Amino acid sequence: MLAARGGLQGLFFRARDRTTLEVSDDGSAVLEDNFVLLSGAFTVRIRWRGAVVSEGRGPAQLRWVSSQAAIFCAVFPTPYVVDRPSVAERLRKDPWELQAMLRARVHDQERRLMVLNRVGQGCLVFMQDADGRRQC
């Protein structure tokens, strides 16, 4: 409710840009989230790495095998890197089921959509952008 009113939460923590998901031809996947802390004094990039796994029965799943957070400060050029941060690891534990692969026309271009269900949490939809990356 506070974020909807434009309160102090936007000064402390907000998304920098859209979540991106890149799935390569060999099935490996990288999900990236970027956040801004303290009105831009710090930026945080969290990356999850995983793979698309199909076990025959049921839908294919995205299983995450590692996570990494990089914290950038406006003053210092070198980021502080944390492998397997606890917050990201809690989110990494649940697999994501691939519910559908669809095609849609957007601005006279055909784009692919990927519908994922995070087990016990809800659905995410990623759409391919002009560069071939999928964005949430």
Image (tube, rainbow, N blue to C red):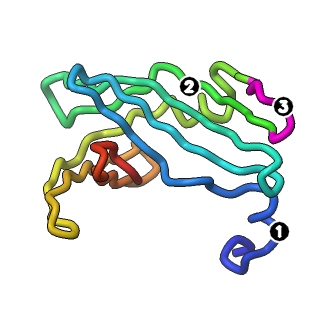
The single residue placed furthest to the right in the displayed view is 75
Image height check: is 76 above or below 3? above
Which amino acid lies under the numbered mark 2 shown in the image of this protein?
Ser
- Span shown in magenta: 74-80
Q: Which residue is mark 3?
A: 76
- Which residue lies at the image location 45% right of the left edge and 36% below the top edge? 31
Precedes in sequence: disc 1 or disc 2: 1
- The stretch drawn in magenta includes residue 24: no
Q: Position of residue 19 (x, y in %)?
A: 48, 48
The residues tagged by marks 3 and 1 sit, at their Cα atoms, a distance apart of 25 Å
Which amino acid lies under the numbered mark 3 shown in the image of this protein?
Phe
- Which residue lies at the image location 14% right of the left edge and 56% below the top edge? 103
By secondary structure, the bulk of the magenta-drawn segment is best described as loop
Q: Nearer the viewer, mark 3 or mark 2?
A: 3
Q: Secondary structure at mark 3?
A: loop
Q: Quadrant of the N terminus?
A: bottom right
- Which residue lies at the image location 46% right of the left edge and 50% below the top edge? 121
Q: Which residue is mark 1?
A: 8
Q: Which residue is mark 2?
A: 67
Which amino acid lies under the numbered mark 1 shown in the image of this protein?
Leu
